[in-house]
């Protein structure tokens, strides 16, 4: 056997220098993200939470208040975000929530307008009533029809059997012969009249040309030309009257301008206007000559194919799959190889267009009477219309109810002229009890530290104050129980995502105490006071107690881990406790809780409240939970449990990221060293404290490795807030001796 060495899992035979790179795990371990808050509540605009595909993507940072206002406009969600990001009026609270996950509970509807002729449905981008202020106007810009003028004619003109035929081919169809009545014609006006009398309806219109004694032929006006998806053409062929009429054989005339639509979309509330002229591009032209016995030819386009049909020639049908051709130009190049067929792109740029953009035309005439003429002139009007709506910031185009797609050919009908049409049906929508459950289900899937429902009473009470839709069905008891269940579930061994709930109740003081006693949960704080603050529009108003809950959650997220909110000053301008309606006049408010005198009772009953000290401002009296079952130093203080949750989550995740999935060649000593480094981070962050028996904030660290399992046990000295300062003062009588 050849001499070799084993290194880094490889057997090496060839001489050389080899290396491996390792990461020293003895360094620092950055703490997992904290200050993550999930809120659920109502807003005037924005997509309902049920329509958010992934709640993890509907998250906002403190620098995104503008985006929050843009999406949700106003309402509890916007107000709560503002409070969560700016909760403190105290230097000890340096910031607010680091990120907010938003679930909108009210099932808003978007305003819509069904476009004429079942073209599609225009739907507002904005959810809620704001979309009802959007208008649509579609003004038709008519085709400038194909026209040709001949040379000067000598009058009087004698029309006989040998010079009385005008032959034309329209839109790639068969040649039509117009037999002009015989006799002497004195001038061009009389000649035009004779031709018009002989021409079949809907073919051509003759008139005097711009130059003296000249004849002008114009393709007759058609109906619904904007719907065809294909352009028209007029061709004078080899009629016997051509020379006398000043016309040239095989002359082709095309419209000077194709039909277009001027689309105007406007938000009447903001005056934001989007306007664009759409349509009229000839993307591709095709023609089939009469070789091989061909007597007629057509081009049709459906979802999947371009179909060439030729009568009198074989094969009768040529089907070209769109999937086989990467662009219009690629298709054009192939068609030019087919016997009797010719094709061209409208321009180099249009040649790069996708075949999917072509209008789905039905039987566009393609028979060419002269070399180079390609009468099947295909547009992309529907695709450009779709593009207009895709680029709009106000609306979108969707299939009409019962349809799977919007119109794929032509332009929209003229509508909203002169008075624009308003979209309608936009509604704020209601919040159901089921939607609360759905919200919490989606919040399960994101890592957060705090959950804040923006509700403080039953839907019936909120509806009476105009704060929710009359059909909303949530109850505050149901919300509280659902959140409590959620918190308990997320703290289980398998879920591994501990979090706290910031609940609220607007009710009598006695009812608030009873609620706290019923909750009796270490993970829940219960705010009971209305809060005066500025709303999303800058107006000072009273908010239900959910506002205080939001401020508290924000302050927790923006403060050092483990810092008690006790005696911290908050960003508010008023507090009151009352079960009365939000519409009650200020002078009629009768508070039944006075924080200056009833603090002991409130603390003993597990409610969270603010006071206004004589020095001014508004401070939290105690950072307590609703637990209250015993004197547990962790469960009764929200900041202590928060620190415990952060430590537990971070410690296990750090170890998971380092060791799960590696071979069990790692030693217990190595794992212990890693644990010591991680635990050292908690001491540096003030999550743990140094004591006489645990200098580094922990003791009794033991690591055991048994097969595929690492067992770690440790005692940590968790940070705790100072609630009391007890000064024992002894007074002594002064005495003097001279």
Image (cartoon, rainbow, N blue to C red):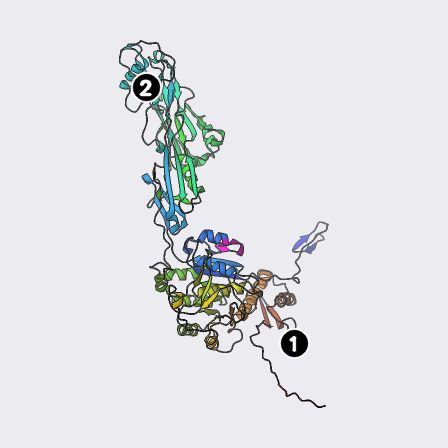
Find the distance from the CA under tag 1 to the CA under tag 2. Answer: 110 Å
Rendering coords of residue 441 (x, y %): 43, 61
| Structural crowding at the residue carrying mark 2, measured as other residues with C-alpha within 10 Å and reported as few (<14), some (14–19) or many (≥20) | many
Say which of 242 and 132 sits in front. 132
Among the 4 quarters of the image, the one containing residue 206: top left
Rendering coords of residue 47 (x, y %): 42, 53
Q: Is residue 488 above or below residue 402?
A: below
Is residue 497 visible from the viewing direction of this image? Answer: no
Q: Is residue 726 above or below residue 265?
A: below
Residue placed under numbered mark 2 in the picture: 206
Q: Quadrant of the C terminus?
A: bottom right
Among the 4 quarters of the image, the one containing residue 468: bottom left
Q: Is residue 131 above or below residue 650?
A: above
64 part of magenta stretch: yes
Mark sitting on residue 99: none
Give the residue at the far bottom of this rendering.
737
Which stretch is magenta? Answer: 57-65
């Amino acid at each position: 056997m050849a001499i070799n060495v084993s290194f880094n899992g490889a057997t090496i035979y060839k001489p050389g220098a080899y290396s491996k790179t390792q990461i020293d795990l003895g360094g620092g371990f950055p703490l997992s993200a904290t200050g993550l808050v999930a809120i659920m509540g109502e807003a005037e605009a924005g997509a309902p939470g049920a329509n958010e595909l992934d709640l993890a993507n509907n998250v906002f940072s403190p620098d995104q208040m503008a985006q929050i206002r843009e999406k949700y406009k106003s309402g509890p969600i916007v107000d709560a975000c503002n409070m969560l990001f700016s909760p403190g009026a105290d230097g000890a609270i340096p910031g607010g929530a680091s990120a907010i996950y938003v679930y909108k509970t009210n099932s808003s509807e978007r305003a819509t307008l069904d476009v004429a002729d079942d073209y599609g449905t225009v739907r507002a981008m904005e959810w809620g009533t704001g979309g009802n202020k959007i208008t649509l106007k579609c003004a038709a810009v008519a085709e400038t029809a194909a026209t040709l003028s001949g040379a000067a004619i000598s009058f009087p003109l004698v029309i006989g059997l040998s010079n009385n035929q005008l032959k034309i081919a329209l839109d790639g169809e068969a040649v039509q012969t117009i037999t002009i009545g015989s006799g002497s014609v004195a001038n061009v006006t009389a000649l035009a009249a004779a031709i018009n009398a002989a021409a079949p309806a809907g073919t051509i219109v003759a008139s005097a040309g711009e130059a003296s004694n000249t004849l002008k032929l114009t393709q007759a006006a058609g109906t619904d030309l904007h719907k065809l998806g294909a352009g028209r053409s007029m061709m004078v062929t080899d009629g016997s009257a051509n020379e006398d009429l000043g016309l040239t054989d095989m002359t082709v005339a095309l419209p000077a301008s194709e039909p277009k639509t001027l689309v105007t979309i406007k938000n009447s509330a903001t005056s934001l206007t989007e306007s664009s002229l759409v349509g009229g591009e000839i993307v591709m032209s095709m023609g089939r000559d009469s070789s091989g016995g061909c007597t007629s030819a057509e081009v049709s386009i459906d979802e999947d194919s371009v179909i060439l049909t030729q009568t009198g020639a074989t094969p009768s049908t040529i089907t070209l799959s769109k999937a086989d051709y990467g662009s219009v130009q690629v298709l054009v190049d192939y068609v030019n190889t087919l016997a009797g067929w010719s094709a061209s792109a409208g321009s180099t740029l249009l040649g790069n267009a996708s075949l999917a953009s072509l209008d789905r035309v039905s039987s566009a005439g393609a028979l060419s009477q002269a070399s180079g003429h390609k009468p099947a002139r295909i547009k992309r009007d529907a695709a450009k219309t779709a593009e207009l709506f895709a680029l709009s910031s106000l609306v979108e185009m969707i299939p009409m109810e019962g349809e799977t797609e919007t119109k794929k050919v032509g332009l929209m009908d003229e509508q909203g002229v002169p008075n624009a049409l308003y979209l309608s049906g936009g509604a704020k929508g209601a919040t159901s009890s089921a939607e609360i459950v759905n919200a919490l289900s989606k919040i399960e899937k994101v890592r957060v530290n705090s959950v804040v429902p923006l509700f403080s009473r039953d839907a019936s009470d909120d509806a009476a104050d105009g704060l929710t839709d009359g059909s909303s069905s949530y109850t505050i008891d149901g919300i509280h129980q659902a959140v409590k269940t959620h918190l308990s579930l997320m703290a289980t061994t398998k879920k591994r995502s501990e979090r706290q709930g910031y609940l609220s109740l607007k009710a009598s003081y006695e009812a608030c105490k009873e609620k706290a006693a019923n909750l009796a949960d270490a993970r829940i704080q219960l705010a009971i006071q209305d809060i005066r603050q500025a709303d999303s529009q800058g107006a000072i108003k009273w908010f239900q107690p959910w506002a205080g809950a939001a401020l508290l959650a924000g302050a927790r997220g923006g403060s050092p881990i483990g810092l008690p909110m006790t005696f911290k000053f908050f960003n508010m301008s008023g507090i009151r406790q009352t079960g009365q309606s939000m519409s009650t006049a200020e002078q009629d408010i009768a508070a039944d809780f006075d924080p200056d005198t009833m603090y002991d009772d409130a603390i003993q009953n597990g409610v969270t409240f603010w006071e206004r000290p004589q020095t001014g401002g508004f401070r939290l009296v105690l950072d307590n939970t609703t637990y209250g079952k015993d004197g547990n130093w962790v469960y009764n203080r929200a900041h202590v449990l928060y620190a415990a949750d952060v430590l537990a989550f971070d410690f296990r995740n750090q170890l998971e990221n380092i060791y799960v999935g590696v071979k069990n060649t790692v030693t217990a000593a190595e794992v212990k060293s890693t644990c010591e480094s991680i635990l050292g981070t908690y001491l540096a962050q003030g999550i743990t404290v140094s004591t006489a028996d645990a200098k580094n904030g922990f003791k009794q660290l033991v690591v055991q490795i048994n097969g595929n399992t690492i067992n770690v046990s440790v005692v940590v000295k968790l940070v705790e807030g100072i609630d009391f300062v007890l000064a024992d003062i002894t007074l002594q009588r002064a005495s003097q001796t001279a």
